[in-house]
Image (cartoon, rainbow, N blue to C red):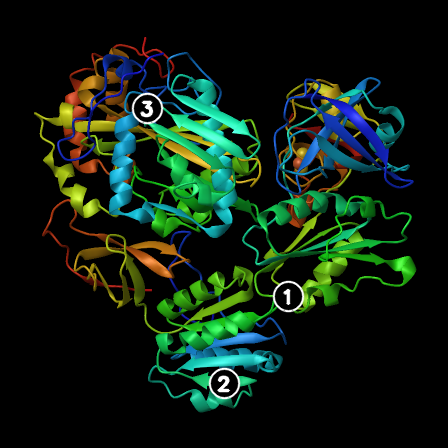
């Protein structure tokens, strides 16, 4: 659907909030806490598609809100949002999908966010509050000025803020210990934080199924590479700031996708021949599959070497 | 559209019947002259005016009688409708989906007024006029799943999605083909399909699960499944198997055309918005062999399908004991002529 | 492999992989009959598991009590039957925190019921370790009357509640901790096949 940008609001020097509404004022589909939408950005010849967590109220269809952090070293999607999108613009926005949902059976939900990783939890807190379910949230940021999440978080006793500059770093073991049976913990943030929580959980004997993390990725930039598509009888060059999936789309090749972040498995593509090394960046294939180099996830993964032939 | 509802029963004297129009729109499940178990999923879009695929929740001449039959079954055994506590939100999502679809697709029968959380629902065929507060169960006579399930043809399972799997955590199930909600509730996709022969080895459920966990909001899917039932009975539950089982052995060459029914399930899958759960409506259609053969293409094709079906599938679908009588009967309607592609009558 | 070796079956049939130590975390351990041997092997392999362990033991005619106590668990309790120890088990589960490991060793019926209790209390399936010891008897739910018949050793068998003759379906419900029993002569009342002994 094409939605109108209703407001652009800076939350911190690096993070800006965008609100989208239907041009006719129609209600948008509701969603569950942790859901994301894919925003389409027409950029010259190509259409960039980036996934962003929704930060607005899941039960409010009057508009969608996202918070975007400017990544100066990224492929340009977030820069585009920050520099080229203004109030009144029309942008394509996909239907919400959720790959980081709450386990609603949980007796208690422990949410741990680092930096911009706060975004999926904003909508989840609203959902948990509406359902009257017990939770606690820990938000970690380096400094108060960078802590854009402060502007999004409600003032509730369950919300704990840890600013490392101010000397109150979060201790993962302290957060996880003593939680009642049936608690689920969710982490979203830098890889170091996700790993620290997984570590502490393992040491405290938490079962893996109770430790969730949002391992959502932005497609990393890289060196350009060539790829041959057997079924379409095409050879393409994937540019440095382009993902393989984007290159397929630009060439008009039909390729499925859902998350565009290496999580959902939807874009999985068979590799027919590979002389070189696939740079697997996804969280979908297991280690053996990655080593075999017979499958690739075009939304995030790249290639270096002589030739790569795909079943597309 | 004006629909006349049949006065009919699905038990006892079995007065269930299909009008000529209902026979023509029956969802015959075979698009070729042979059958193999497959996933065969397609988008659930409005297809072919007048067919059972025209609307998202088909309402037909059996609606009122089916809802009466469900009420009898639920009074006998309330465990046919259950919801684990975390599924209430999905129940509300499902109630909204049905009310919105039916009031849009059948405005002469169903009306929904919404003013914020204050909703007003009118179901004319069943004579229901209900004002309630959305997401407040105390304003409905029962939970949301049971409330709307008592007004919607077909069984409905609510599937929670987590750990990359789907979990059968709620449902209203009174016309099932031999599975027990009370036993299966809480199971994951592989567990509740465990008794299906062969398909696991073929990797069918792996592929189906991958597809289903990716079903997106606003993009429902559907598939057809089938089995055979003696007498037009909706409640062929394992719970009551010892009560209806003897009827299976009452088929004779003389009565097979009238008593033996093809039972087709129109299964659909919708992603629900607030809960991220899936709802899995399983709508059952019944047609007697003698009605089915009034469409010559179906008579020919059904004969060929059943004649060539592997024994273990006939066994699994529970009609092996009557198979030869069924095939002999159908053979009389198969002149060997070619059949056209697709499921619809010529 | 530790414990009883079963023939491969359908996917809803539980697999008892043998007790595997989850380290020196708080633990609830329930052993019935020869299942006590599994706890001894576990402690032998990793003595640290006993430091915070609460052992609930149902001897069921075996004499392993003293040996279990000698493993030095933090708490030890002996009870005559599962129903007798259930209140204690429920209290232990209610007091437990995330990270508590659960070890269950014994017959299929006991494993099934204790697992169902634990899941209902919020324990994740991944925190439960099981090992089968004892006969191949099964715990069966009658799909018709919903009554549970314990220690079923023949197929078909007679439902101890409604009296129907039921055949043993491999289909297993973790929520109920039981297999499914379905009327064997539903279509041909009175024609009941000869009983056979259930094998693992
Ligand atoms: S689109 Fe989800 S893994 Fe590639």
Badge 2, how many Cα within 10 Å: few under 14, some, many 20+?
some
Name the disc covering residue C170, or none. Answer: none
Judging depth in this view, the residue of C170 and B111 nearest the camera is B111
- Whole-percent x and y of residue B206? 50, 41
Find disc 1 in the rendering and name its residue.
A179
Name the disc covering residue C76, or none. Answer: 2
- Whole-percent x and y of residue C11? 42, 51
Judging depth in this view, the residue of B264 and B338 nearest the camera is B264
Q: Residue at x 65, y 56 (%)?
A: A135
Q: Is mark 1 within 8 Å of ligand 1?
A: no
Where is B190 relative to A157, above or below? above
Where is A61 relative to B78, above or below? above
**Cα distance, mark 2 to mark 3?**
64 Å
Q: Residue at x 80, y 45 (%)?
A: A116
Q: Nearer the viewer, mark 2 or mark 3?
A: 3
Q: Chain of mark 2?
A: C
Q: Nearer the viewer, mark 2 or mark 1?
A: 1
Q: Which quadrant holds residue B56? A: top left
Q: Which quadrant holds residue B141? A: top left
Query: Could one spot residue B307 in this view of the protein?
Result: yes
Judging depth in this view, the residue of C20 and A296 nearest the camera is C20
Q: Chain of mark 1?
A: A
**Do callouts 3 and 1 mark residues in contact (Cβ within 8 Å)?**
no
Q: Secondary structure at mark 1?
A: loop
- Whole-percent x and y of residue C58? 39, 80
In the rendered image, which quarter contains the C terminus of chain A?
A: top right
Find disc 3 in the rendering and name its residue.
B125
Residue C150 horizontal side relative to residue B107, left or right: left
**Cα distance, mark 3 to mark 1?**
52 Å
Tally the marks: 3
Residue A157 horizontal side relative to residue C186, left or right: right
Q: Chain of mark 3?
A: B
């Amino acid at each position: 659907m094409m939605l109108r940008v209703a407001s652009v609001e800076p939350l911190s020097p690096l993070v800006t909030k965008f609100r989208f509404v239907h041009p006719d004022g129609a209600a948008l589909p509701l969603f569950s806490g942790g859901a994301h939408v894919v925003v389409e950005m027409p950029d010259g010849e190509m259409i960039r598609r980036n996934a962003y967590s929704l930060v607005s109220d899941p039960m409010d269809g009057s508009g969608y809100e996202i918070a975007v952090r400017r990544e100066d070293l990224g492929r340009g999607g977030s820069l585009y949002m920050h520099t080229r999108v203004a109030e009144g613009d029309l942008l394509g926005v996909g239907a919400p999908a959720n790959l980081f949902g709450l386990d609603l059976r949980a007796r208690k939900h422990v949410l741990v966010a680092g930096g911009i990783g706060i975004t999926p939890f904003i909508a989840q807190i609203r959902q948990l509050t509406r359902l009257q379910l017990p939770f606690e949230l820990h938000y970690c940021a380096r400094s108060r000025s960078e802590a854009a999440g402060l502007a999004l978080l409600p003032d509730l006793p369950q919300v704990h803020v840890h600013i490392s500059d101010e000397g109150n770093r979060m201790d993962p073991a302290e957060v996880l210990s003593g939680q009642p049976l049936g608690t689920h913990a969710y982490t979203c943030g830098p890889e170091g934080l996700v790993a620290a929580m997984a570590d502490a959980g393992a040491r405290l004997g938490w079962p893996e199924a109770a430790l969730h993390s949002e391992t959502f990725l932005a497609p990393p930039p890289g060196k350009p590479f060539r790829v041959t598509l057997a079924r379409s009888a095409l050879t393409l060059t994937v540019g440095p700031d382009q993902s393989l999936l984007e290159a397929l789309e630009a060439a008009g090749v039909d390729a499925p996708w859902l998350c565009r972040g290496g999580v959902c498995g939807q874009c999985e593509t068979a590799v027919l021949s590979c002389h070189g090394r696939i740079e697997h960046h996804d969280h979908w294939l297991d280690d053996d599959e990655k080593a075999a180099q017979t499958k690739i996830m075009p939304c995030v993964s790249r290639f270096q070497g002589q030739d790569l032939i795909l079943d597309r | 559209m004006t629909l006349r509802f049949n006065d009919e029963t699905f038990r006892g004297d079995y007065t269930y019947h299909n009008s000529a129009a209902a026979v023509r729109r029956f969802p015959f499940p075979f698009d070729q002259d042979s059958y193999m178990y497959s996933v065969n999923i397609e988008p659930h879009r409005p297809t072919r005016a007048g067919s059972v695929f025209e609307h998202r929740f088909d309402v037909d001449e059996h609606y009122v009688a089916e809802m009466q039959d469900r009420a009898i079954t639920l009074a006998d055994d309330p465990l046919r409708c259950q919801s684990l506590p975390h599924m209430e939100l999905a129940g509300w999502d499902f109630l909204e989906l049905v009310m919105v679809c039916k009031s849009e697709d059948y405005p002469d029968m169903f009306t929904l007024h919404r003013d914020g959380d204050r909703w007003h629902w009118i179901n004319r065929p069943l004579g229901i006029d209900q004002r309630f507060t959305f997401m407040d169960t105390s304003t409905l006579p029962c939970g949301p799943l049971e409330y709307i399930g008592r007004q919607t043809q077909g069984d409905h399972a609510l599937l929670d999605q987590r750990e990359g799997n789907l979990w059968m955590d709620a449902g209203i199930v009174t016309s099932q083909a031999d599975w027990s909600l009370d036993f299966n509730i809480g199971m994951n996709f592989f567990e509740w399909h465990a008794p299906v022969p062969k398909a696991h080895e073929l990797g069918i459920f792996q592929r189906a699960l991958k597809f289903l966990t990716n079903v997106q909001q606003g993009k429902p899917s559907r598939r057809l499944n089938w089995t055979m039932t003696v007498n037009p009975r909706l409640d062929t539950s394992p719970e009551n198997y010892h009560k209806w089982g003897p009827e299976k052995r009452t088929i004779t060459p003389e009565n097979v055309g009238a008593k033996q029914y093809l039972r087709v399930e129109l299964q659909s899958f919708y992603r629900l918005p607030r809960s991220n759960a899936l709802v899995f409506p399983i709508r059952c259609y019944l047609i007697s062999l003698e009605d089915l053969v009034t469409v010559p293409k179906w008579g020919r094709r059904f004969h060929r399908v059943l004649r060539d079906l592997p024994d273990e599938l006939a066994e699994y679908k529970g009609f092996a004991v009557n198979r030869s009588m069924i095939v002999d009967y159908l053979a009389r309607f198969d002149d060997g002529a070619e059949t056209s592609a697709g499921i619809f009558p010529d | 492999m530790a414990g009883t070796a079963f023939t491969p079956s359908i996917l809803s049939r539980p697999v008892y992989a043998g007790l595997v130590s989850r380290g020196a975390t708080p633990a609830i351990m329930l052993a019935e009959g020869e299942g006590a041997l599994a706890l001894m092997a576990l402690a032998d392999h990793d003595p640290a598991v006993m430091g915070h362990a609460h052992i609930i033991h149902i001897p069921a005619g075996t004499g392993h009590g003293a040996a279990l106590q000698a493993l030095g668990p933090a708490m030890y309790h002996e009870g005559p039957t599962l129903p007798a120890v259930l209140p204690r088990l429920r209290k232990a589960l209610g007091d437990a925190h995330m990270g508590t490991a659960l070890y269950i060793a014994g017959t299929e019926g006991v494993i099934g019921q204790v697992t169902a209790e634990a899941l209902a209390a919020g324990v994740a399936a991944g925190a439960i370790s099981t090992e089968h010891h004892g006969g191949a008897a099964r715990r069966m739910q009658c799909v018709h009357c919903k009554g549970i018949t314990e220690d079923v050793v023949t197929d078909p068998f007679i439902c101890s509640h409604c009296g129907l003759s039921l055949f043993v379906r491999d289909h297993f419900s973790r929520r109920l901790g039981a297999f499914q029993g379905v009327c064997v002569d539903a279509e041909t009342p009175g024609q009941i096949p000869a009983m056979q002994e259930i094998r693992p």
